[in-house]
Amino acid sequence: MKTVLIKEDIVSRNNERAKDVRALTRNKNVYYVNVMSSPGAGKTTLLEKLIPLLGDRYRIGVIEADIDSDKDALDVERATGVKTIQMHTGGACHITCQMSMEALQALGTDGLDLIFLENIGNLVCPAEFDTGADLNLVLLSVPEGDDKPLKYPLMFEVASAVAVTKTDVAPIFDFSRAAAAENVRRRNAAAPVFFLSAKKGEGIEELADYLLEQIDKKLRSM
């Protein structure tokens, strides 16, 4: 009982802080996307392919969150040329709203329209903590299996959209697109599912079009 109360208190305080993050991005006319997945699902590679499709319309920044190393930040910056910072979590397996706010302030929101946060690779903890993002993009890679939405329900319940990655290796694995989509729908009927291969460039444009629609929708409402 005490553990539950402590956890609820932590999450409650985090959710209150999320209001501050949303107020910041709203006042700065910035759209904020939280990208979540298990380790190795292809978050960084997807950003490298996705950002060039959005860069003609929006000024983009990226926050790379890792327990250690700055490899992902350097890779994204080299591949896309956008403003990028590395955030180290000091061993934490998720990003809190306090971390989110500090990272946004360190990156700087002035002169940016769209910011991606690449969250820690983990299908459990990041789902429990609101980052203040406008949209949660959850990745599910083919090698993980089409049953992951059933085993990690909260991650897919908080998803705004789901991208199934690495479809080019599907013939090697026992993976069903239909089963994956159905399992996502069982957890979240509202989240669209995109199937893509960053390696082959397949499906990236469809995801980019969806994001453009969501960004325009927010900006029109301001």
Image (tube, grey):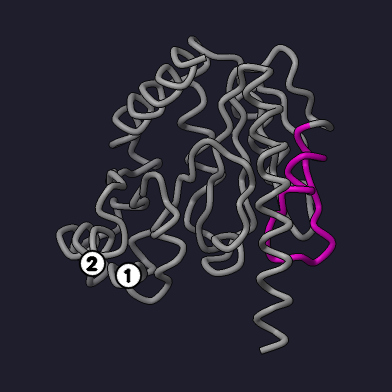
Q: Please state the horizontal and vertical placement of residue 11, each as a whole percent of the image.
A: 67, 63
In the rendered structure, the answer to whether residue 49 lies left or right of residue 191 reads: right
Is 98 magenta? The answer is yes
- Marks 1 and 2 sit apart, C-alpha to C-alpha, by 6 Å
Q: Amino acid at mark 2?
A: Phe
- At label 1, counting other C-alpha atoms closer than 10 Å, the crowd grade (few under 14, some 14-19, many 20 or more) is some
Disc 2 is placed on an element classified as loop
Q: Residue at x 81, y 53 (%)?
A: 88
In the image, 46 versus 190, the foreground residue is: 190
Q: Residue at x 73, y 76 (%)?
A: 6
Q: Quarter of the image holding residue 170?
A: bottom left
The image's mark for residue 145 is: 1
Q: Residue at x 39, y 59 (%)?
A: 157
In the rendered structure, the answer to whether residue 98 lies left or right of residue 163 reads: right
Disc 1 is placed on an element classified as loop
Q: Which residue is mark 2?
A: 175
- At label 2, counting other C-alpha atoms closer than 10 Å, the crowd grade (few under 14, some 14-19, many 20 or more) is some
Q: Are marks 1 and 2 in contact (CB under 8 Å)?
A: yes
Question: Which region is colored magenta?
Answer: 86-104
Q: Residue at x 71, y 27 (%)?
A: 24
